[in-house]
Amino acid sequence: MLLLARRSVWNYPAGMAMVAILAAVFVQSRLYAVAGLQIFFFLAQAQGLWAWARAPREAGAVSVRQMPRRGWPAVIGTGVAASALLAMLLRETDAAAPISDGTVAGWSLVAQLLTNGRYLESWPIWVGINILSIGLYASQALWVTAALYVAFLAVAVYSWREWHGAARASRA
């Protein structure tokens, strides 16, 4: 994730390896939405690699964009709808935590698409997702995974700051 903070295209191959490993952990823990989310993430990592390889660069790093204010209703609506739909589907299974599992997965879909689009606004969403994820994984006694998401939270805060600085610099 630090490669993502630095706006490096190499984040995507590393991310593909990471999500493959996490998928196995989540299936074993019956966290089906976040396990299935890893398939989406793998495909999104491939799309992000393709998009970022072609994106404009500033000072050797991929440029950052800001989402127009009119984009927020679609972002919020999509996050809420995806979370609710996944939670309802998970209630029909033996999922360990259908509501929080569905919420993490639903909002992660949105945040990943914003990240692939190089939008600064992906980072506050990632911060929220990571906070919820820490609680979810701790509630399932997945202590190593919860600790990993504490690190992801720190990186998300750092990335938000770095991308904000890059966006400010590009406006100047």
Image (spheres, helix red, strand yellow):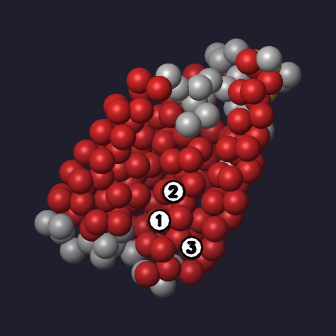
The mark found on residue 146 in the picture is 3
x and y, in percent, of residue 4 in the image: 69, 41
**Residue 64 in which image quadrant:** top right
Q: Which sits earlier in the primary sequence, circle 3 or circle 2?
A: 2
In terms of secondary structure, where does tag 3 sit? helix
Q: What is the distance, in whole Å, between disc 1 and disc 2 at their CAs?
A: 6 Å
Specify few, some or many for label 2: CA neighbours under 10 Å numbering under 14, 14-19, or 20 or more.
Answer: some
x and y, in percent, of residue 166 in the image: 76, 29
Q: What is the distance, in whole Å, between disc 3 and disc 2 at their CAs?
A: 14 Å
Is label 3 or label 2 in front? 2
Q: Is residue 103 left or right of residue 11?
A: left
Residue at 41% over, 44% down = 109
Is label 3 or label 1 in front? 1
Please name whichever residue, 72 or 91, is drawn nearer the observer in this view of the structure.
72
Q: Where is the C terminus found, in terms of image quarters?
A: top right
Q: What is the distance, in whole Å, between disc 3 and disc 1 at their CAs?
A: 10 Å
Residue at 30% over, 39% down = 77
Please name whichever residue, 156 or 16, is drawn nearer the observer in this view of the structure.
156
In terms of secondary structure, where does tag 1 sit? helix
Name the amino acid, label 3. Ala
x and y, in percent, of residue 14 in the image: 66, 46
Name the amino acid, label 2. Gly
